[in-house]
Image (cartoon, grey):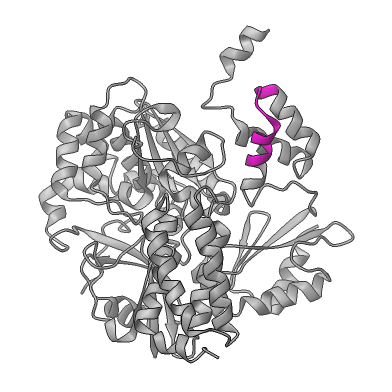
Amino acid sequence: MTKIKTQTISPQNENILIRLKRVESQFGYIPEESITEVAQSLDLPVSEIYGVATFYSFLATKPLGRNVIWVCQNLPCHLKHAEITIDNLERTLGIKPGETTSDNKFSLELTNCIGACDYAPAMLINRDLHGNLTPNKISQILKLYK
Amino acid sequence: MPEKQIVLKNCQMINPRDINTYLARHDFKALAKAQVMEPDEIINEVKASGLRGRGGAGFPCGSKWEAARNTPGDEKYLVGNADEGEVGTFKDRYIIENDPFTFIEGITIAAYAIGAKQSYIYLRSEYHRLRNLLENAISQAKDKGFLKHVKIDIREGAGAYICGEETALMDSIEGKRGEPRYRPPFPTTKGLWGNPTVINNVETLMNIPNIILNGAQQFRQIGTERSKGTKVFSVSGDVAKPGVYELVLGSKLRELVIDLAGAETVKMVQIGGAMGRIVSSTMLDTSLSFETILGAGGVIVYNESRDTIDIVLRTMEFLNKESCGKCSPCREGTEAMVKILQKFAGGRGTPKDTGLLEELSSTMMLASLCGLGQAAPFPVIDSLQYFRHDYESRIK
């Protein structure tokens, strides 16, 4: 059995980041126990796995809501009043950036440039892009998510 | 007209989900032509074209390929860098959305030239929605028999600006924290898993099929002495028509932001994003080229109502957040700059603070490990040069 394992696992196709993404898609975040498990199975120190898990902003080490809203806060969006979008989302959802609604439906996060400056102000919900945001549009968009 | 469509010529003309619409126009002719050439011939053609990297650094593409080709080893890699994270830059997104096939044809030719059997597209996680489009294009190209000599796999980031830097990108593909490596060794000698690796920006690879098909001499006909061909720009901010524009290299900034994007009452323009340069409205006749200012082609326009300190502070906050923390000049320098800029923002600057910003700038440029820390002081240096009064008016 071990032999088959070493044949199929190559560094090209199996590494810490790929493992952690798999954990995240299973649990919605990366629990501490999974970090230990990944460390054991790859025979690496826990600190190394934890280091990777906390390096990338799209990997979560705490539970998030079913849908994660990432609002772009960089200059091209800022010039198009991103703060109105953020304020609108805060009031609609009743949470601040970094928080999750009590029904677990949405988490609100601020993020850096998502490469949609031609649709500013813009946000990602999960990995869907929504741009040219207005308060009206935001309330319509939020209805799309369960 | 400074506008010329070479890289973007298929955009809006083909269906990005259907390779047959691409074949009707081009038929992967460039790959067919490349495959009857010797790899060295291809590399010489790309060298002769003068093509320089479009991701910001402007390194001669042919020389990079040659270095990887000439490094001994059976295992070599080609990476298409689609980790477009620079603030205000979205041209590679537009390219992939509209014409994934030229990009893939470029990868196949590059891989053949350097001798790579495996290639990766490193796609930023923020562009996850394009993954399916790219996978579809790869599988259609494979079905048509264009990928017999090279396998193309997609590797996705997980949200880290620094991973656009090529050595950090390699660490991320290897599944580690995306932190820049010390150079030398350069990726072309010791890259992915220690093997020779070429990392090219999406737009660089988009130029390859045209160079192979029409020859280096035709490619060299436009541009400036040391900047040949065109550049794709993404324009945002205070403009009537934000979007993607392809211009002959050497075109004037005015032609891009005023004539094409429709900017009015320009105060300043940030060229090349957070790590780019800031110019004032008196400099709109600056030409856009590697000799002058270019970056990856992200151009943000600010009108006269905008506050210089606010712009520079927000830029520095971004760089501070995205600094990977590996080297102290960048990690601590960006932090210290944010704190000083916050003082100016609150009208609490002191005469000493401008000197401190300048001193920090020179240390960071000299001592930082990678391009992020070396370029992070640019917005401060440029704004102090052109808008010093905006700092002085905030001294208490």
Q: Give the range drawn in magenta.
A: A41-51
Residue B276 x/y as whole percent: 38, 66
User: Which is more toward the observer, B17 or B169?
Assistant: B169
In this rendering, position of residue B289 left or right of residue B167: left
User: Which is more toward the observer, A49 or B1?
Assistant: A49
Residue B8: say if magenta: no
Residue in view at x 41 percent, y 89 percent:
B389
Q: Is residue B235 visible?
A: no
Residue B77 x/y as whole percent: 38, 31
Q: Is residue B341 visible?
A: yes
In this rendering, position of residue B309 left or right of residue B210: right
In this rendering, position of residue A112 left or right of residue B388: right
Residue at the farthest front position: B352
Residue A21: image quadrant is: top right
Quadrant showing the N terminus of chain A: top right
Residue in view at x 70 percent, y 32 percent:
A46
Residue B381: image quadrant is: bottom left
Q: Main secondary structure of the magenta part?
A: helix
Residue in view at x 29 percent, y 51 percent:
B53
User: Which is more toward the observer, B229 or B348?
Assistant: B348
Q: In this view, does A29 lie above or below A44?
A: below
Residue in view at x 62 percent, y 7 percent:
A3
Residue B88 x/y as whole percent: 46, 67
Q: Is residue B230 above or below residue A82?
A: above
Residue B94 x/y as whole percent: 43, 59
Residue A45: say if magenta: yes
